[in-house]
Image (tube, helix red, strand yellow):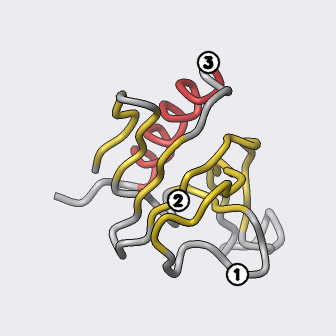
Amino acid sequence: MTIGSGQMDETIKGIATYVCDNPNGTYEISFPEGDRYICLFSTDDYEDNDEEPDSPGYEEWYTLDFKVAEVATPGPNKDPEYGFISISRKRMPSLIVRGDEVVYRA
C-alpha cells in the first residue's frame, strides 16, 4: 500500500506534536538505508522546491530538523557538511525512539 503525500505530511505533523511536547532529551532516528543518528530536536517548518508558488511544478512539504549529536551509523541521510538531518515525506525515517518510547515506526 502506498501512502499519499497528504497522509505522510499528517504523519510528520503527528511526530512534530510529540517532539514539540517533549523537546528535551535525545531522539534516535534510523533510516531504511541503515544510517542511525542520535539527535536533538531543532525546528519545524515548511520547505518548498524553489519553484514560483503559482507555477504548476510548485510543491511544499512539512519538515522537522534535528541537530545531530552523534552519528551512530553513517549513511546518506546526513550531508557531511551540515550537523542536521531533516525528516519529511521526502526523507522519511524507519524508526524514531526517545528513551524507551517508540515515537514512530514505519
Q: Is residue 50 left or right of residue 92?
A: right
Farthest top residue in view:
21
Query: Which three-letter amino acid code belongs to the residue tagged 2?
Result: Tyr
In the rendered image, which residue does mark 1 sit on?
A: 80
Distance between mark 2 and mark 1 Cα atoms: 13 Å
Q: Are marks 3 and 1 in contact (CB under 8 Å)?
A: no
Residue plotted at (67% across, 54% down): 69
Q: Nearer the viewer, residue 41 or 14?
A: 41
Q: Position of residue 60 (x, y in %)?
A: 67, 58
In primary-sequence order, the first of circles 2 and 3 is 3
Distance between mark 2 and mark 3 Cα atoms: 21 Å
Q: Nearer the viewer, residue 86 or 88?
A: 86
Query: Which three-letter amino acid code belongs to the residue tagged 1?
Result: Pro
Q: Position of residue 22 (x, y in %)?
A: 60, 22
Residue 37's disc is 2
Count neighbours of disc 1 (C-alpha within 10 A) and say few if under 14, some if 14 to 19, many if 20 or more. Answer: few
In the rendered image, which residue does mark 3 sit on?
A: 21
What is the secondary structure assignment of the residue under circle 2?
strand
Count neighbours of disc 3 (C-alpha within 10 A) and say few if under 14, some if 14 to 19, many if 20 or more. Answer: few
Against 73, is 21 above or below?
above
Q: Is residue 102 left or right of residue 62?
A: left
In primary-sequence order, the first of circles 2 and 1 is 2
Residue plotted at (49% across, 64% down): 72
